[in-house]
Amino acid sequence: MNDRGSSGTGEIPNRDAADFEAQAVRGLAVAYRRMREEIAKVIIGQDEVVDQLLIAMFSRGHCLLVGVPGLAKTLLVSTVARILQLSFRRIQFTPDLMPSDITGTDVLQDDPETGRRTFQFMQGPLFTHVLLADEINRTPPKTQAALLEAMQERHVTVGSNTYRLPSPFFVLATQNPIEQEGTYPLPEAQLDRFMFNTVVRYPSAAEELRILKQTTGSHEPELKPALTGQQILALQEVVRKVPVAEHVFLYARDLVRATRPNEPDASPFIKKYLSWGAGPRAGQYLILGAKARAILEGRFHVSTEDIRSVARPVLRHRILTTFQADSDGISPDDVVDKLIQMIPVAVQQKAKRIAGAPDDAAH
């Protein structure tokens, strides 16, 4: 990941830049509300999923959507692409899919002017702004690795040539959590490239009734564009410049380090239920996600509440639970929730020790 995700506090250099970026933040907050209104014309409910998708997009991240079929994941992605005036392609991942099927390949063609044959690169479906990688765990590791290069480096390599992908470039991959037969589970290295692991849940009873009424009639909602690709790129830069206070950086660091069972000060809960914790990239994504959430709400500062709000989708696929956790019914989300409860107490006790006051545990 780019080092910019973890360096500096994002201070604005002068008043003109500050005024411009403050105006950009207000503009993004307005655009965000407009996007939510347009998405709601097509997608009923799934507010948390929509929020996480947009936060990841404005943070230059990628999303892994985990949910059973029929929850409008494809419709959500195509709707977002339409209102943002971005190109959209869907790849149905299958066991026989080869890397060249998604990246493109060199094709031998005749040159009518010279009569010679030359190789020309034919772009694959990766060359788009928004890519839906449907059931990504159904394709072999070799093809998964080709997608990994595109996600991380934002380019593809075919033969001896490297081709840049369009900007912005956003990958939304889906997984079915129920059917695992004949699949190739994503390795931890590739899971770590996804900013968010977003769980798509069933709608509520009221939402499901609205879905039945809205989707079985003849009405076709008319969507209005909200942002262009160039505006998205500019706003992604604004997200990077959102200032972060020192105590927020410390909170994100402590939250990530608390997931590691081999740390000397790891809690017994973590040692019991986790066999592997999150790496530094988790902290970077916590900060970036918190920055994006802040400005989507019209704030030009980040709070610890912003960190807590993105902790689940950032951490749930970066921690590995033990057999004991499975036996006790402890999920990764349960672990993250427990850590969120534990970390503020640790911070308060550290502050008291610095001030010379007794720890809470001593009472």
Image (spheres, helix red, strand yellow):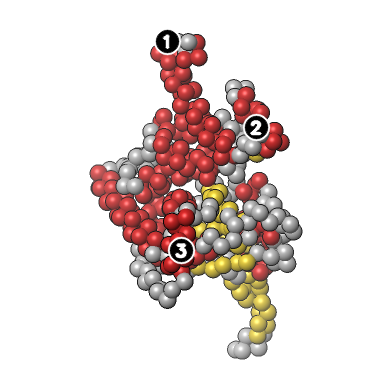
Can residue 125 be seen at all in this image of the molecule?
yes
Residue 224 position in % (x across, y down): 35, 68
Q: Secondary structure at mark 1?
A: loop
| Nearer to me, 323 or 257 | 323
* Label pair 3/1, CB-CB below 8 angstroms: no
| Nearer to me, 177 or 17 | 177
Q: CA distance from mark 3 to mark 2?
A: 39 Å
- Above or below, 52 against 281 in this view is below
**Residue type (three-letter) at the residue carrying disc 1:** Gly
**Residue type (three-letter) at the residue carrying disc 3:** Ile
Q: Determine which residue is flagged by label 2.
A: 273
Badge 3, how many Cα within 10 Å: few under 14, some, many 20+?
Answer: some
Can residue 50 be seen at all in this image of the molecule?
no
- Above or below, 234 against 341 in this view is below
Identify the residue shown where x is 40% and y is 13%.
355
**Residue type (three-letter) at the residue carrying disc 2:** Tyr
Residue 96 position in % (x across, y down): 73, 67
Q: Which mark is residue 211?
A: 3
State which tag comes first along the sequence, 1 or 2. Answer: 2
Q: CA distance from mark 1 to mark 2?
A: 34 Å
Residue 193 position in % (x across, y down): 58, 49
Q: Nearer the viewer, mark 3 or mark 2?
A: 3
Badge 2, how many Cα within 10 Å: few under 14, some, many 20+?
Answer: many
Quarter location, residue 331 = top right
Q: Determine which residue is flagged by label 1.
A: 356
